[in-house]
Amino acid sequence: IVLSEGLTTETYLDTGNRDLFANGPGAMVLHPDLSGIDRPKSWHQDACAELVTDAAFVEPIWQSLADRAGERLGIVDHVMTSDDPDLHVLIDGQRITGRVIEGRVYHFDLPQGARDIIIASRAARPSDAQPWLDDRRLLGVAIGQIVADGVLIAPASYGQGWHEEEPHHRWTDGAAHLRLAEPALTLMIDVCGSLSYRQPRSRPAAA
């Protein structure tokens, strides 16, 4: 514990990411662990105070600090977001845009012989748009099911770019690979959820 402007503050806890710092190899350990037990530290076991990441607790604190920064320092973060996932598929580098049917189901017409497909979309981390959330996964869209030529596609056909399966859906990371057992001409994707995707800041044109 150190004092920072009169406030008791917990210092850096080495949970195994020391090498991420530019001066990592040369950092001095003030209180080395001499127990001889070589194990990575964790916030739940080794922190001086309990680590709370529940959004209901963290959001009011974050908002209070953001309001103070705006009032005293004039800092306002204008974040541009889009609710459009820009869902499309890529086949051999060719972009194919689908059409929405039945609210959340996307229909794609595929070229002859299509088997290896990338389900592409915008992607974002929930913690980027809402910093009080402890979810740092890169998420594209949440997909309930995929049907190719009327046949339900099993998860065994999913390649890289997929997060762990959840009870009713599975998130992509914005570029999810799919390999069909047989070529298909149509693909229907049931999208269960998406995010507000942070947009890059536009740079002023050079004079």
Image (tube, helix red, strand yellow):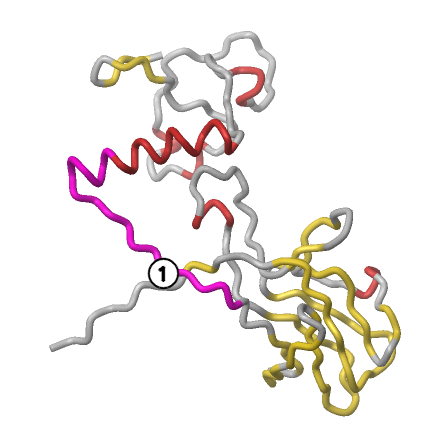
Q: Residue at x 84, y 68 (%)?
A: 153
Query: In the rendered view, does 90 fall on the left or right side of 32?
Result: right
Query: In the rendered view, does 129 fall on the left or right side of 144?
Result: left
How many marks are shown on the rendered structure? 1
Determine the secondary structure under disc 1: loop
The residue stretch that appears in magenta: 68-84
Q: Residue at x 46, y 12 (%)?
A: 48
Query: In the rendered view, does 128 fall on the left or right side of 154?
Result: left
The answer to which of 31 and 134 lies nearer the viewer is: 134
Percent position of residue 151, x then y: 88, 74
Quarter assignment of residue 40: top right
Q: Kindly give the residue lying farthest to the top in the view shown.
A: 35
Quarter of the figure that contains the N terminus: top left
Q: Amino acid at mark 1?
A: Met
The answer to which of 41 and 103 lies nearer the viewer is: 103
Q: Residue at x 70, y 77 (%)?
A: 101
Is the residue marked by circle 1 packed among few (<14), some (14-19), or many (20+) residues within 10 Å? few
Quarter assignment of residue 81: bottom left
Asked if one can make out residue 134 in the rendered structure from this viewpoint, the answer is yes
To which residue does mark 1 refer?
A: 80
Residue 92 vs 12, above or below: the answer is below
Percent position of residue 162, x then y: 68, 57
| Residue 129 located within the stretch drawn in magenta | no
Percent position of residue 49, x then y: 47, 14
Quarter of the figure that contains the C terminus: bottom left
Q: Residue at x 50, y 51 (%)?
A: 125
The answer to which of 178 and 31 lies nearer the viewer is: 178
Residue 40 vs 109, above or below: the answer is above
Quarter assignment of residue 116: bottom right
Asked if one can make out residue 41 in the rendered structure from this viewpoint, the answer is no
Residue 101 vs 131, above or below: the answer is below
Percent position of residue 55, x then y: 51, 33
